[in-house]
């Protein structure tokens, strides 16, 4: 197994307010902290170019194409080919984020489902992983993922995982990965912490979901990719492994899943 010597932030929104004003600084601080690769997640097709341009600018930043469930009404009924076309770019390595959010219900659920299906089709056709956002939608999410999986294999990750043990188990069974955000470090996240302890080391990713969800001890600040280190340290403690072990495992998992990427060299402190 290769030695990476760095961590990956598997989910951040570098084009969002809070990060975009100091893009170069955000990336520099991440590198200096030991983050060797960042995945910039697209949430609206009309912002795809913003994500693509950031990914083109930095060797250690990659991007995705997708429509967040919150945007399913603004960008309804996306054509699979529209996703596939944009995913052909060399720095675009995943499909999403997509999924179901019944907590906010910002878009009608049937519209969320239609877009979710289209993203899964694009993932299946391109062989790229789908990045799944699911909140308060365990039953429908499990059902849609398993129905779609029965039609033909695809790869993917449940990002910012906060769902039930049942959803985690079902997704692991389907071969999907699970990404843990700063929420796991919150005092209130007891159930999530118990679930994290059960996740196999070879299916685990870490992320910031920045600019949101700054982990302890940064709560209240704008989250940025450098803070993925705090989440990784916390998860290592939870799982009773060393930081180095957690880092190497999650980084190897990321590149196994996002296999369009040639792993970059750490551009920060360790030249
Ligand atoms: Zn999300
Ligand atoms: Zn996100």
Image (spheres, rainbow, N blue to C red):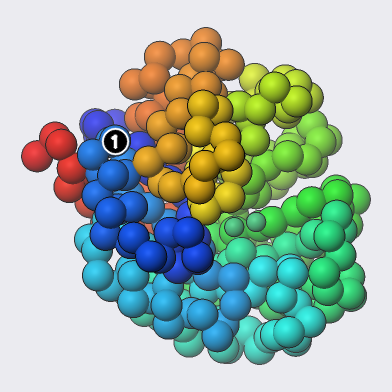
Residue 252 visible in image: no
> Which corner quadrant of the image does residue 160 belong to?
top right
Q: Indicate the quadrant containing the C terminus: top left, top right, bottom left or bottom right.
A: top left
Q: Residue furthest front?
A: 220
Q: Which residue is mark 1?
A: 33
Residue 54 visible in image: yes
* Position of residue 177 in the picture relative to residue 72 (left or right): left
Q: Residue furthest left?
A: 271
For image coordinates 38% across by 53% down, the residue present is 38
For image coordinates 81% across by 36% down, the residue present is 164
In the image, residue 88 lies at what x, y percent? Answer: 41, 80
In the image, residue 127 lies at what x, y percent? Answer: 50, 67
For image coordinates 35% across by 30% down, the residue present is 248
The image shows residue 70, relative to residue 232, as above or below, that is: below
* Position of residue 109 in the picture relative to residue 160 (left or right): right
Mark 1: few, some, or many residues within 10 Å (few <14, many ≥20)?
A: some
* Position of residue 32 in the picture relative to residue 43 (left or right): left
Ligand 2 found in image quarter: bottom right
Camera-nearest residue between 136 and 138: 136
């Amino acid at each position: 197994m290769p030695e990476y010597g760095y961590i990956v932030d598997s989910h951040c929104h570098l084009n969002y307010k809070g990060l975009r004003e100091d893009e170069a600084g955000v990336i520099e601080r991440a590198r200096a902290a030991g983050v060797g690769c960042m995945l910039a997640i697209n949430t609206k097709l009309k912002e795809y170019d913003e994500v693509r341009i950031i990914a083109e600018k930095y060797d250690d930043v990659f991007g995705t194409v997708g429509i967040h469930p919150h945007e399913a009404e603004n960008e309804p009924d996306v054509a699979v080919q529209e996703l596939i076309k944009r995913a052909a770019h060399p720095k675009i390595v995943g499909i999403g984020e997509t999924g179901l959010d019944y907590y906010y219900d910002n878009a009608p659920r049937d519209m969320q489902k239609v877009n979710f299906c289209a993203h899964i089709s694009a993932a299946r056709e391109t062989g790229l992983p789908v990045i799944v956002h699911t909140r308060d939608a365990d039953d429908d999410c499990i059902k849609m993922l398993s129905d779609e999986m029965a039609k033909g294999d695809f790869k993917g990750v449940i990002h910012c995982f906060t769902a039930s043990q049942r959803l985690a188990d079902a997704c692991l069974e389907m071969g999907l990965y699970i990404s843990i955000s700063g929420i796991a470090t919150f005092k209130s996240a007891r159930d999530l912490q118990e679930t994290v302890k059960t996740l196999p080391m070879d299916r685990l990713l870490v992320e910031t979901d920045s600019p949101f969800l700054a982990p302890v001890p940064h709560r209240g600040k704008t989250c940025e990719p450098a803070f993925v280190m705090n989440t990784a340290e916390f998860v290592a403690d939870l799982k009773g492994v060393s930081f180095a072990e957690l880092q190497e495992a999650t980084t190897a998992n990321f590149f196994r899943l996002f296999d369009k990427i040639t792993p970059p060299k750490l551009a920060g402190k360790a030249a």
